[in-house]
Image (tube, grey):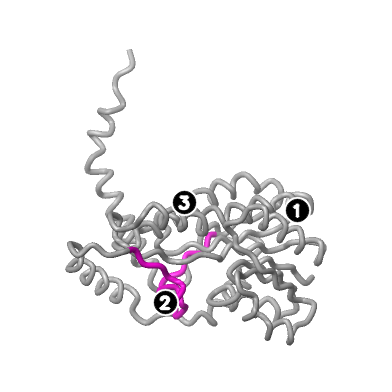
Amino acid sequence: MPRTWFITGASRGFGREWTIAALERGDSVAAIARDTGSLADLVQEYGDRVLPIRLDVDDREAVVAAVGEAHERFGRLDVVVNNAGYGQFGMIEEVSEAEARAQFDTNVFGALFVTQAALPYLREQGSGHFLQVSSIGGISAFPNIGIYNASKWALEAFSQSLAAEVADFGIKVTIIEPGAYGTDWAGSSARHAEQIPAYDAFREKAAEQRRARAGDPGDPVATRAAVLRLVDAEDPPLRIFLGDGPLAIATRDYDSRLATWRAWEPVSVAAQGRRD
């Protein structure tokens, strides 16, 4: 049976690739973007199976209306992809309150609003699949993107809780954690805090480390097949990496955490106190 997708951030990057993947196999897509002009070619090629909706996911009322519009048009929602987001660059000291709040408004609250708006429809039909687009930065953290990392950690936390809460309704949740890809994430879509000169030397060091981690960026087109396999899986994973770099980063990070927790376990146990 053809599926209906609701994809935020559909105008470029992963969102556009997955929109194309769904359309090419005969599914329908509510393609959500702040600027729907870039979707005109898809509308021309796929006609009524594409519903472009101009939306800022920071606006809760507009999100509810957009989800309702998509459901009214297609009659159901099968795959909800929370992909809208951007990268905020800046050392923790450099990021302003407004920049930090804007990062969370889009990356966390935008995904939360879409999820909450879609849930009643998915519960009613007894099925559905949320794809929550996180990052390797959602389980690890790196210099100069700390607020971005924080937003993705928050997305991962509520999505893991969500998975347990909705399983009995037949709803599935998968957190997608890409590594470095040839998208515009660090380009025109990124935002940059005003720099403090004291961090200049470390900033260059952090940039070199980021380039080394990125290696040869992945091809976004290659993620199409992976995402289709996810939504077709009878038992999809709660988490999945995209790309061949994230597992090594996660392994080093979690090995270090476990070693530290074990080394300090006597202090942890002593902090429990005694119960008479």
Question: Which of the pair 215/59 is nearer the observer?
Answer: 59
Q: Is residue 20 above or below residue 119?
A: below
Helix, strand or loop under label 2: loop
Q: Position of residue 84 (x, y in %)?
A: 55, 65
Which labelled disc corresponds to residue 82? none
Q: Position of residue 256 (x, y in %)?
A: 27, 54
Q: Main secondary structure of the magenta part?
A: loop
Task: Find disc 1 in the rendering and name its residue.
Answer: 121
Which residue appears farthest toward the top when viewing the image? 276
Cα distance in 3D space between marks 1 and 3 = 24 Å
Instruction: For the residues labelled 3 and 2, say whether their Cβ atoms are less than 8 Å apart.
Output: no
Amino acid carrying mark 3 in the image = Ala
Q: Split into 4 quadrants, where in the image is the C terminus?
A: top left
Q: Quadrant of residue 22?
A: bottom right
Viewer-side label of 1, 2:
2
Q: Is residue 176 magenta?
A: yes
Cα distance in 3D space between marks 3 and 2 = 23 Å
Name the residue: 46% across, 69% down. Answer: 178
Name the residue: 45% across, 64% down. Answer: 135
Task: Find disc 2 in the rendering and name its residue.
Answer: 187
